[in-house]
Image: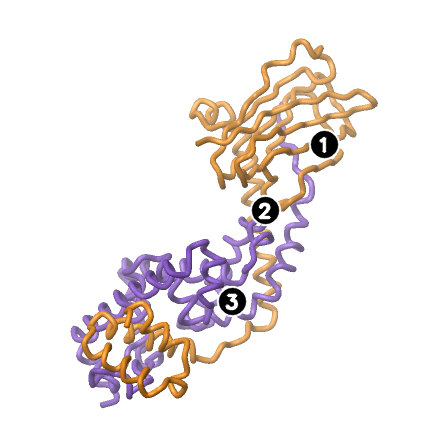
Chain colours: A orange, B purple
Amino acid sequence: MNCDDVIEQLLDTDEDALSVLERSQLVAHLADCESCQDALRAANALRMVRKQPVLSAPDGLFDRVMNHTTHSTDSGARRSQFWTGVAFGGLLAAGIAIAVVTLGLFQAPSSSLPEVPVVTMALGERQEVDIAIDADKDLPGTTVNVVLSGDFEFAGFGKQRELSWTTDLEKGVNRLALPLLAVGKTQGHLIVRLEHEGTRRIFRVDLNLSG
Amino acid sequence: MSRILKTPGRTSGHDRFATLMRPHFDPLYGAARRLASSDADAEDLVQEVCMKAYLRLSDLESIEHPRAYLFRMLYNIFIDSVRSQQRSPVSIAADSASVDEIELAADKRLQPEEQTDRLISLELLWRAMSILDKEQCALLALHDIDGYSLAELESLTGMPVGTIKSRLHRTRNKLGRLLRREMSARPQLSLVGT
């Protein structure tokens, strides 16, 4: 009898359902096998934990935990975004891959666009990608549209590959922090579209997989 | 001037997370309560699992067995807490063993040794588990405590059933050996109930 099978048989089979032969084989194996004796000792201890009553959560705990979880985590995310912005140059110097698109929004001709920035991520890695948008004046009511392709996701947004919203850009550098998750092996792009009063600018970031 | 643009829709994560967690919350708390020595500790454990799970919300939404995933998180967090307690100068409450004592051997007929009258405390069991590999212990707990089948563990871990069986057996074997040594080193535990 295989040692791997002994405890599985004991755990998965009602002992009364064992035949006389199976029972005697088990007893004989256990008597001679210290390894299985140890495994049985552990299995019995864990089985007794399993037999303890399962208590229900106290009233109100679910809501308390949910509120605390999302409040704390989202606050942490906002703090993280803030510090990402403040430490922008430092992070670049440290070699952390952050795409940077700094443009004179709505004024720079397309021929002056910098080279397409590239972000390289490992499979399963989550990374905040910062897009710096330099506007020469206040641009209220700007529509921001971001689209992902390839095996990348917006972390926290599941399978949603496109996000759109309206925001007020201010004169100077506006930083857009996008949490990306690499979920597969296909390279892709992040397309950022900005539209203000009928004028549109499109930025692209190439997303590569390392390894 | 520099400012941060807030990505829209993040607040909806609360509703998505709550919807996903609701059917698993009671079982998760029940499992945590079996591990923890008090209601407050169980609530802390559940809170920590939720904090970590919320950060992996998109993963949770896409996997086949979110409950098993949450339970695995629970065991990992719990084992970490046991380890940190052991490093802490504050010792475990002296009366915890008497409250949590469980009978070691349920099946006297299949015990080759006369050890059925011995008792193992939960404290001893968790401490022994905390010495072993965390992931392997979580796998063992999912199978032996929570009753997840080998097929379900295969789906959760991506490992073949044969590999899971071997790992479970090896981990049980190590755990049982540690318990045997601890029991012989702590004769006061073996005297209870004799």
Q: Say which label, 2 or 1, has the lower sequence index.
A: 2
Q: Residue furthest bottom?
A: B194
Q: Residues within 10 Å of mark 1 (few under 14, many from 20)?
A: some
Mark identifier at residue B78? none
Looking at the image, residue B67 lies above or below residue B187? above
Residue type of the residue flagged with mark 1? Asn
Q: Secondary structure at mark 3?
A: helix
Residue type of the residue flagged with mark 2? Asp
Q: Secondary structure at mark 1?
A: strand
User: Which residue is more in the foreground, A92 or A4?
Assistant: A4
Residue A115 lies left or right of residue B157; in this view the side is right
The quadrant the C terminus of chain B occupies is bottom left
Residue at image location 56% in from the left, 42% down from the top: A77
Residue type of the residue flagged with mark 3? Leu
Q: Residues within 10 Å of mark 2 (few under 14, many from 20)?
A: some
Q: Which residue is mark 3?
A: B28
